[in-house]
Image (cartoon, coloured by chain):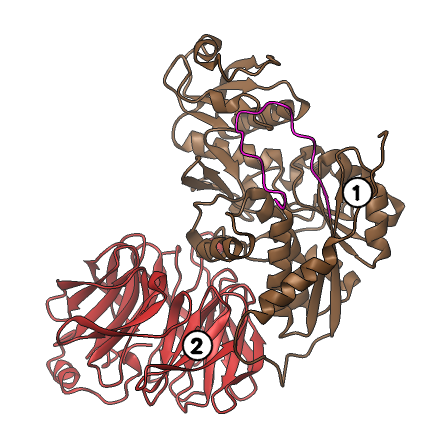
Chain colours: A brown, B red
Amino acid sequence: MTTTRLPHLLHSVSLAALGAVLLAGTPGVGAAAQPLPQTVGEIRIGFLSQTPEPPPSVADPAEPAADDGLAGAALAIADNNTTGKFLKQSFVLDSVEVAPDGDAATALRELAGRGDRFVIVDAPGATVEALSKLPEARNLLLLNATAPDDALRGGGCAPNLVHVAPSRAMLADALGQYLVKKRWPRWFLVTGRRPEDKLYADAIRRAAKRFGGQIVAEKDWTAESDVNRTAESEIPVFTQTKAYDVLVVADEVGEFGDYLSYRTADPRPVAGTQGLVPTVWHRTHEQWGAAQLQSRFKASAKRPMTARDHNDWTAVRVVGEAAARARTADPDRLIAFIQSPDFTMSAFRGAPLSLRPWDGQLRQPVLLAADRSLVSVSPQEGFLHPRTELDSLGYDQPETLCKTRGKTTP
Amino acid sequence: MTASRSTGISLAALVATLLASAASAQTIYVSNEKDNTLSVIDGKSMAVTDTIKVGKRPRGITLSKDGTQLFICASDDHAVQVLDLASKKIVHNLPSGEDPEQFALSPDGKSLFIANEDSNIVTVVDVPTRKVAFQVDVGVEPEGMDVSPDGRWGVNTSETTSMVHWIDMEKRAVVDNTLVGPRPRYAQFTKDGSQLWVSSEIGGTVSVIDTATRQVKKVVDFHIKGVAKDRIQPVGVKLTDDGRYAFVALGPANHVAVVDAKTFEVKDYLLVGRRVWQLALTPDQKTLYTTNGVSGDVSVIDVDGLKVTKSVKVGRYPWGVAVKG
């Protein structure tokens, strides 16, 4: 890291004001009189975001919104405060944005200095891991909201780190179960040139092994040039291979994956990072009350909720739900409660979310979505697990490589 | 909150009892959430005799106290529609606030309590004047509503806040809150008003709350062999007037649980259609109807025999159900 941009801690005031407006916007009589027994208190949540520099050329020209992610956290703070007013609990979000080459450690120290014991980290895996090792982070709870790296849940795990975003293994397993259930077991794996693409491909290979898929062919997409204008001639040639059922693509930033559909040599569907995508959220998802969250988000952010927004919403709600359930604002008790088997919460995906004690990963269903429609929700029926079917996604207790977290029975 | 709440036994129901027939001269109304219609089922032939076009995304429905009108939450029209049952025409709308989902009628039939899901508010409408009497702030995503038989309490459950909010009718304000399992969907008072039963969809439980103290006195849990725990998602609850049973619709578990309302033991699980949602008892308490969203039908349950006797195909995503005796 060469240059250091000072983090700007300017969001907390405006967010608090936004929360106040949201609360004041509802007419009617205020509540209270004989509230529940509780600890009165303020709970401060830090929000540290770092968005990597996008590559110069991606297939989809639509840029993410400037408040992608943060808008989800802001809505969750408003949700927490609506519940909190009945419990005399209030929630404040301190937001800090770190430049792609900025100093995340200093930003974390500043948040800790403000008394934030919970810090949502919306940043690449390397940043998450570095922050979790800081001495100042020892008595914080870091909530990894977006980094999918399995290594962070394995060898890189930490007792002060929990993972709200599903891991790549969970995403790949969610997709793999569906493809196997559809009896499309022969996969042609196309992997991009970036390190995260290799990790995504590894997760797909692992899913194939677990659920009876077969990688019948593999190719690496190495072109550094933008194939926008040449895709129609290049991709039919590139995709000539052995007989397969589905082309599975690993291209996390979206350099070429979007060009594959409708251009393959054989008429085959595309899935993975493009095409049919495993994700936590999709704008067409409306089951299990999701329609309500979609419309609440649209009303506050004036745009549809993205997967990143949803991850950040969930991370802030984890703290809010724990505070309501444990009826305390005491950070030490909340940190313990979140990681206990008693903690569960709802996140509009049809099954309760809870933390896996062996690696701190939030158990959760994963949506499978096409561009304009929700296709399915995993775990798929028939993929059984003695504890909960949600544990058929990702690294189960016997497989975990995490050594620094308690291996208590879940 | 359907006709099961009405106290008097109608003549038709009495005749039905005497003839020991399942039902007679009863009419069942079902709202079809994704068809924007109501299905009308004849209680004798168990056939759909009419389909009535109503507003967008009809969900909760309830009969007026005199049984001549049906109130319909037309969620996407942001209105409560009033259907005249004789002419089968919408006669007017009531002001409802944003996105009404469920509601409850006060025992005197004059106040309608409406949960406004998108705006974290309960709207109380004065039915005779068709005006909003007052609104109260509640938790995130208000859903279940009921009014205590003595008219003192209006209760609302908020799904994301996971609480029951107790609205004091005289003070017109929330005066107490009870925390229950995640995502509470439905609330019903016992006939004597001493208990409130509340289902928690994601918690997979039903909380029985003592009205006097507003404390949870019992949590009912469900286990069905061969069904994963997290697929057991309680939604609709119906209590028989005699205090014998509580019926609980278990959503995607496709079963209705039969709970002994005195001991809180689960006696049985009845297999019904897919994604069972809401329930309604006939005024004679002999028959229970369930709406099954995914299979698009209504299951008919014989209450004395605890048997599913029939299923009736209705529209797409049946949601609410009300029985006119």
Name the residue type under label 2: Thr
To which chain does the residue with label 1 belong? Answer: A
**Relative to residue B188, is residue A277 drawn left or right?**
right
The disc label shown at residue B123, or none: 2
B316 or B239, which lies in front? B316
Query: What predominant SS class does the magenta segment belong to?
Result: loop
B186 or B141, which lies in front? B141
In the picture shown, does residue A69 fall above or below B264?
above
Q: Which residues are magenta?
A: A48-68
Q: Secondary structure at mark 2?
A: strand
Residue A63: in magenta span = yes
Asked if disc 2 and disc 1 are in contact, CB closer than 8 Å, the reply is: no
Residue B18: in magenta span = no
Residue B17 position within the rendered picture, expressed as x and y whole percent measured from the top left: 16, 82
In the picture shown, does residue B309 fall above or below A58?
below
**Relative to residue A198, is residue B70 drawn left or right?**
left
Quarter of the image for the N terminus of chain A: give it: top right
